[in-house]
Amino acid sequence: MKISELLDKESVFSQTTCTSKKCALEKISHIAAEKLDMDPQQLFNALIAREKIGSTGVGHGIAIPHVKIDSSHSATAIFMQCSSGIDYDSYDGNKVDILFAIFVPEDRCKQYLTALSEISKKLLDKRYIRQIRSAENNESLYKLLQID
Amino acid sequence: MDIIKQTITIQNKLGLHTRATIKLVELVNDFDAKITIRHHDKQADADSVLGLLVLETCYGQEIEIIATGNEAQQAMSAVTQLIEDKFLEEE
């Protein structure tokens, strides 16, 4: 599963104002709910429940919040770059300013791992991360994320 | 410097997903050792969550663990134990 298959222009947000982890996950829930035609509160509750098991902060200012959704929906993702770092309880203690949220049908675990692998490969590139952090608008961020 | 290698099968249902990789990285950071994980043609240092996620390792697949450093043996024992314990996940 390519990242470009999960993201469309309406799923990518640069320089977003987020004051907290809760604030960021609320925004993501509302955007995803519109795409998936689901209840935003239900998605938010699921994201929070997942964070309670353990933070999805993967270090270096990056988080990959994720939930499984009903098999009747298609997999989707939201990419949000925040204008400043937020406390996220990441294992390395760093604040998070890049969130890649994944919503994958519960019967497609393999697709989820493939999507994780694809985005992780990109986010390991420090030069690429710098470009993402300095993207001035949603369109330029979207173009960056289309690079395979 | 001694190099210790061991091959082990991933036994938790979700494989090396986010929560499991974070547990692995936190564990490895407790030791004076460098751990590398190999899966198929990819390899990653076990101190990087993103690096481990790139490996895309599922349930039932084999990985090779390579340990070096002063506490290589202890680190290897701890890592293999975590994998055998299914990363403390229920299934």
Image: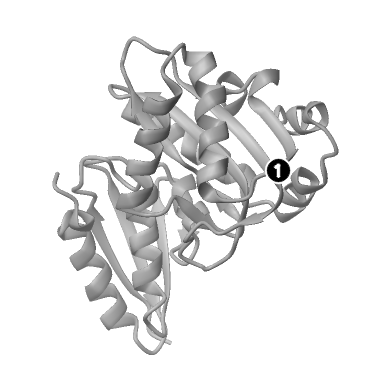
B46 vs A127: above or below: below
Look at 53% across and 15% down and name the residue there: A34
Q: Quadrant of the C terminus of chain A?
A: top right
A18 vs A91: above or below: above
- Counting from the top left corner in percent of width and height, residue A21 is at 53, 49
Q: Chain of mark 1?
A: A
The image quarter containing residue B79 is bottom left
Q: Secondary structure at mark 1?
A: loop
Look at 42% across and 15% down and name the residue there: A38
Q: Is residue B44 visible?
A: yes
Q: Left or right: A107 with respect to A59?
A: left
The answer to which of B13 and A135 lies nearer the viewer is A135
- Counting from the top left corner in percent of width and height, residue B63 is at 31, 53
The answer to which of B71 and A77 lies nearer the viewer is A77
Task: Count residues near mark 1 (Cα–Cα under 10 Å), then give few for <14, some for 14-19, many for 20+.
Answer: some
A44 vs B51: above or below: above
All told, the count of numbered labels is: 1
Q: Left or right: B20 with respect to A88?
A: left
Q: How is the image coloured?
A: one colour
Q: Which residue is mark 1?
A: A17
Look at 48% across and 60% down and name the residue there: A90
A37 vs A147: above or below: above
- Counting from the top left corner in percent of width and height, residue A145 is at 70, 32
Among all residues in the image, which is located at the extreme right?
A136
Q: Left or right: B76 with respect to B81?
A: right
For badge 1, the amino acid type reads: Thr
Look at 38% across and 42% down and name the residue there: A48
Q: Left or right: A69 with respect to A25?
A: left
The image quarter containing residue A71 is top left
Q: Is residue A111 visible?
A: no
